[in-house]
Image (tube, rainbow, N blue to C red):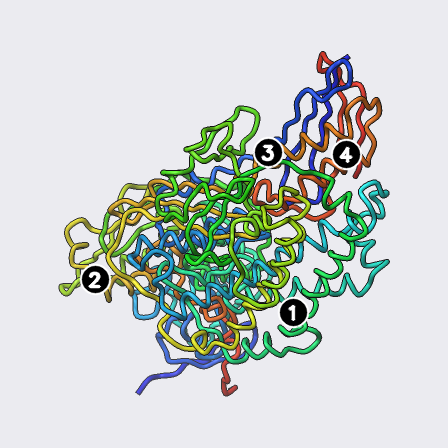
Amino acid sequence: MGQKITIEPVTRVEGHGKVTIHLDNEGNIEQTRLHIVEFRGFERFVQGRPYWEMPVLVQRLCGICPVSHHLAAAKALDVIVGAGNGDDLTPTGEKMRRLMHYGQMFQSHTLHFFHLASPDLLFGIDADPVKRNVINIAAVNRDLAIQAVMMRKYGQEVIQATAGKKIHGTGAIPGGINKHLSEEERDSLLDGDDYMNIDKMIEWSLAAIEFFKDYHKKNKEIIDGFIEFPSSFLSLVRKDGALDLYHGVLRAVDDQGKKILHDVDYQEYDKYIDEEVRSWSYMKFPYLKEFGKKAGWYTVGPLARMNTIDFIDTPLAQKEFEEFRAYNDGKPSLRPMHSHWARLIEIIHSAEKIKMLLNDPDLMEGELVKKGTKQYEGVGLIEAPRGTLFHHYKIDDNDQIVMANLIVSTTNNNQPMNEAVNQVATRVMTGQTEITEGMMNAVEVAIRAYDPCLSCATHALGQMPLEISLYDANDRLINRRVKE
Amino acid sequence: MSQFVRFTIDGTECMAAKGQYIVEAAKENGVYIPTLCNFPGVKPKGGCRICTIRVNGRLMTACTTPVAEDMSIENEVKDIRELRKSIVELLMVEGNHFCPACEKSGQCELQALAYRFQIMAPRFPYQFPVRKIDASHPKIMKDQNRCIQCKRCIRAIKDEKGRNIFAYRKRSSSVEVVVDVKLGKQLTDELAQKAMDVCPVGSILVKEKGFVIPIGERKYDNMPIGSDIENMQVSKI
């Protein structure tokens, strides 16, 4: 008898999604799907609003990385107010935004690694869920838990200093930024008490990657062997090929590292990228037009960035990047669990960049905003923690938005996540008559590697119930298991 | 020379120039009476009723009632406070006030009053009216979703001949404030900014300029509405 297994909602991810796994009569995996079941409608309801509201309005998509939406929208509007394509702002405008973004990257990656992913690594995928959570990390490894909390707090403090608030600030405005960094803010971030200083953050970032590498050595089957499949990778890179999380050109490479999108201007992204709608999910499926809907999908995010760039321009992160590249024989890593490694390299890079910026006098004085001749269309791209984020707006003569297109990082990872779910489900569930908690979590671990923000919305950590339902071939419920 | 009168507010002895409106007289004595439709320098209207007080046992509007000798005024008493709170709550649900993305957030008098009255959740059902944004004027945008029809812009913004640049259109629940089609062309940059500043909410926005005041420096970020008056050093009688 055929079965349908539903994992809903998927836990320890941002947002609400569900997985359905259809088994045939022999218990083989027939089909797996990651469904995104929330509908938001931002692209529609921003129409008619004044364009300068966008950075503040659209960031409400998300409570985890609102800064990414805030900055991507601001970058698109830079084009509209005639302030150039991302790299023509005043030094103060660009550097304050960069500081905000590195603070965001630092806190978001920290949140994902320590709070969401590390329970799987520390306690095991099969561990009792009562123990497999961030609270238990605090119980068994107090120092690690303190680091996690303080690192996230530090990133949030950077955001507050630049955006005015830790969540949903207003710092970036079309053409620049609305404030300087005060001496007091700079000093507290450079040399604050109670761990809250940048040198301590760099030290802890290095300790975090050592923790991961030590785990990797002892658990290669999880990090290297858990999932592996060929994929193309896409990200922004700086014009010289360096990692640049704020601005650059669009590059994509195939699974062998060969460039398939050649450092193009993202203002023309729609020449190269399109989105496919499938009836069973509210999340679209982007693809590279040149390769078609079936073969054109790609991965974004920390792992994609490590696979597309040539180097990192900060020394400590570069050293780790070289080790990462060498481990993968100089080729792209096709193992999604390596995303955790990539994420930790980016935590170091962000901390190094924050230190450089805090010592830059441009943040404390200089022109904040630049404006030029008004345009009617603008595209803003940024490397958000979860990957490349696209914002595209058109306005009319009255300064009202007439078109908005947002391709959110997680949307770009839609197909890769489905591939990962399929691979893990096939391995752990084929031929099984009973679906265990460990099997369920294995599927979630695969999704979690992408750190998806499924609805780009805030959902309380740890308060989401997990429900699995088993259906027979006639869609009759035969068993249900709920974990509160 | 002005003639002074003595009166009490909530039992406290006060003194002010005869003929002064109660809201101003109270202010000079360090007592805050909340207002919305009232604006310094503009003829009072008594439209919003937020400034309702009880004078010698009768409910009056403090912005339109001149102070007089021996008046006994009740201001911070439970039933009046509740009435004012209800007005703010009704205004909040009557329009579409989404503070998170509003340019005036932190400078909005309606929002500031909601904080003062500790309005945490709506008591009345949201009306979600379907209203439009009029963005046709080259200098300003009129967001009807946020307009509370206080008439401040109509009364305060005038051309060189003293004619109103803003006006009411339609009637009853459909009434809306619009820019006069002909006189609106005379709106200078200064008047456009003044119109935005006069508006107690985020209904009038100067175009192409948003969120330029950082969080922390907005009017009510560190100074709740009324606190400037209440913290004023007043020499007691």
The chain letter under disc 3 is A
Name the element at disc 4.
Answer: helix
Q: Are marks 3 and 4 in contact (CB under 8 Å)?
A: no
The chain letter under disc 4 is A
Q: Amino acid at mark 1?
A: Ile
Q: Nearer the viewer, residue A158 or B39?
A: A158
Q: Mark 1 or mark 3: which comes first in sequence?
A: 3
- Identify the residue position indicated by label 2 in the image: B158
Q: Please identify the quadrant where the C terminus of chain A is shown.
A: top right
- Identify the residue position indicated by label 1 in the image: A202
Q: Position of residue B176 (x, y in %)?
A: 31, 46
- Identify the residue position indicated by label 4 in the image: A440
Does the rendering let one see residue B114?
yes
Category of crowding for the residue at label 1, using alpha-carbon neighbours closer than 10 angstroms: few (below 14), some (14–19), many (at least 20): many
Residue A36: image tag: 3
Does the rendering let one see residue B60?
no
Tell me the distance, in whole angstroms, between the alpha carbons under discs 1 and 2.
59 Å
Category of crowding for the residue at label 4, using alpha-carbon neighbours closer than 10 angstroms: few (below 14), some (14–19), many (at least 20): many
Q: Are marks 1 and 2 on the same chain?
A: no
Q: Residue at x 62, y 63 (%)?
A: A319
Q: Is residue A218 left or right of residue A157?
A: right
Q: Amino acid at mark 4?
A: Met
- Nearer mark to the viewer, of 4 and 2: 4
Q: Residue at x 52, y 40 (%)?
A: A254
Q: Are marks 1 and 3 on the same chain?
A: yes
- Nearer mark to the viewer, of 1 and 3: 1
The chain letter under disc 2 is B
